[in-house]
Image (tube, rainbow, N blue to C red):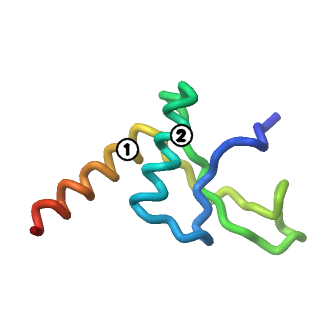
Amino acid sequence: MADRNVDVINIDDENTVATLRTQLSRVFSLGSLDGGFPIVTRVDMSHAGPGGLKMIGYIAHNELEHALSAWILLRLGDH
């Protein structure tokens, strides 16, 4: 059975470096070091899973942390 209370990244929402870092910090503070985020989108309810969401991808917490850190370092190099 899937956990329906897991944090997700919804591509229909505005996702910024700041919001993703906050989301990542929240799961790390809960002790979740080796999990990840399902990447979802809203879909027509006739094709939807629980809550009208369809999983279209997945990113591990450590991969997202690395990508966000690399993006920040790249941006710092631009200045």
Q: In percent of the image, x 49 and y 33: which residue is there? A: 28
Query: Is residue 13 found left or right of 79 in the rendered image?
Result: right
Tell me the mark number nearer the camera, choosing from 2 and 1.
Answer: 2
Above or below — where is 19 with respect to 59?
A: below
| Camera-nearest residue between 12 and 1 | 12
| Camera-nearest residue between 69 and 60 | 69
Q: Quadrant of the C terminus?
A: bottom left
Q: Quadrant of the N terminus?
A: top right
- Residue type at numbered disc 2: Arg
Query: Is residue 33 found left or right of 52 in the rendered image?
Result: left
Where is residue 4, by image quadrant?
top right
The single residue placed furthest to the bottom in the displayed view is 44
Residue 2 position, x and y percent, is 78, 38
Image disc number at residue 65: 1
- Residue type at numbered disc 1: Glu
Please tell me whether mark 2 sits on a helix, a strand or a loop: helix
Residue of label 2: 26
Dot 1 alpha-carbon crowd within 10 angstroms: few under 14, some 14 to 19, many 20 or more: some
Q: In percent of the image, x 81 and y 64: which residue is there? A: 52
Above or below — where is 72 with respect to 24?
A: below
| Camera-nearest residue between 9 and 46 | 9
Dot 2 alpha-carbon crowd within 10 angstroms: few under 14, some 14 to 19, many 20 or more: few
Image disc number at residue 16: none
Where is residue 17, by image quadrant?
bottom left
Residue 32 position, x and y percent, is 54, 29
The mark total stands at: 2
